[in-house]
Amino acid sequence: MRFFAIAIYLFLAVVATAASIVSLREGESRAFRLSALLSAVAVAWAGVLWEVAVSAPWLATCSTVLAAVLITAALLPYDPVRRALRTSAPPSKNVDERDVIFARRRLVSGTTRFEAYYSEHPEKRAVDDRWRARPGLLSTDAAFYQPLWFAAADASFDTIEALHPHVDGPVENNRVPLDAVEATRFVKDWLKHSGAHSVGVTALRDYHLYTHRGRQEPYGEPIRKRHRWAIAFTVEMSHELLRFAPLAPTVRESADQYLRAGAMAVKLAWMIRKLGYPARAHVDGNYEVICPLVARDAGLGEIGRMGLLMTPRLGPRVRIAVVTTDLPLVPDAAQPDAAVIDACLHCRKCAANCPAQAIPFGPRVDEQGVLRWRIDAEACFTYWSTVGTDCARCVRVCPFSHPDN
């Protein structure tokens, strides 16, 4: 029994050592320390058993039973789908893009539009004044300013702006008859060949749309549902560069992938219009839809604690673009992912590591039937405006973001 117990604890030490090596390579210092401590404790206890268990055989027996219980508990099959996790109903209230913080960022002090908005929403004036007092995103005065990385990110965002006039356009008069199955397969294959990580199709729903324009002209114009389908796709963000979050390499990678996704969306929409079907690309800074909601309904993932789309293989380490269209398509079947919700309920790693304390620690809250974690967007953006990057520390520490998740 003594040798069997020693073998078990040495096995645990090997497993913990392997976990600590992986954690060290991924830059996860807390996980490394815990794994290394567990390895040291297991080796030390094996040494105790070697020295003491001869005169106290009961110690080896108890140690073996304890180890067996712990290993069994760790290996027991666990299916969060069987838990009574309440699913969220579709949103019953649409979002006005004018209220989104990126739209408020574009308001210019002293203008009629600025005064009109804060007259209607006086509760937002004080909190917005706080982030306006900071240097700003990609500012040369920001805490994490780095000229090369910031200039590269700014260039990518400027290039995305150059794409905005092409998100929509005239449709060819001669419509090409197409089979929905064939068209769906072609679109998915083409996007993946172009660099998309995942692609899905959903029926365009009313709650996918903003109610009014907030970042593009004409400002305040109502947004109408014009298309039947939405094609959502993701592109991968570099794990190596996100390890620097919240420093400058992160914002360059973010901008690069927004540009890559945007260019793919514009190209796809242009192709569809050439076939005689209306299509509009929704890219950074020029959206009519809320991309994470569309992507979720297209089967690409679930909305997690940090308010971002959690994909099965890359977690939140993606950027999203959408094309809405009337091209004949076959929608994907999307089901609520209880495994992701359960993981986010217990993990809280993003909340613990958020430098702005903008991510809640508690359970999801019910907002008009919609279960969600509501992040503090103002606190988040105030931090962005201080350091000059889009942070992404929550994305960096999320276990789903790891290459071996």
Image (cartoon, rainbow, N blue to C red):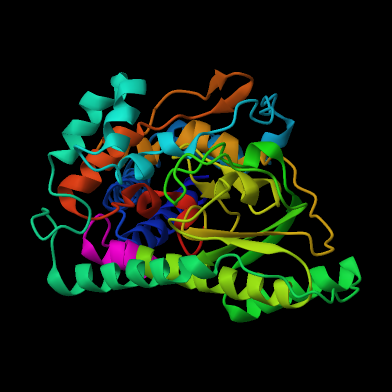
Point out the residue furthest to the left here. Answer: 141
Q: From where the camera sits, is residue 43 visible?
A: no
Residue 346 at x, y percent in the picture: 49, 32
Seen at 72% across and 47% down, the residue is 204
In-image side of 143 versus 209 (left or right):
left
Q: From where the camera sits, is residue 210 visible?
A: yes
Seen at 65% across and 54% down, the residue is 300
Seen at 53% across and 39% down, the residue is 212
In-image side of 183 versus 397 (left or right):
right
Reply yes or no: does residue 249 show up in magenta. yes
Residue 269 at x, y percent in the picture: 65, 69
Reply yes or no: does residue 238 show up in magenta. yes
The image quarter in which residue 328 lies: bottom right
In this rendered view, identify the residue nearer to me: 132 or 36. Answer: 132
Point out the residue furthest to the bottom here. Answer: 193
Is residue 129 depicted above or below 149 in this figure? above
In-image side of 239 versus 281 (left or right):
left
**Number of marks present in the image shown:** 0
Seen at 43% across and 23% down, the residue is 362
Provide the residue span drawn in magenta.
237-252
In-image side of 135 versus 236 (left or right):
left
Residue 369 at x, y percent in the picture: 64, 20
Residue 83 at x, y percent in the picture: 69, 28
In this rendered view, identify the residue nearer to me: 205 or 336. Answer: 205
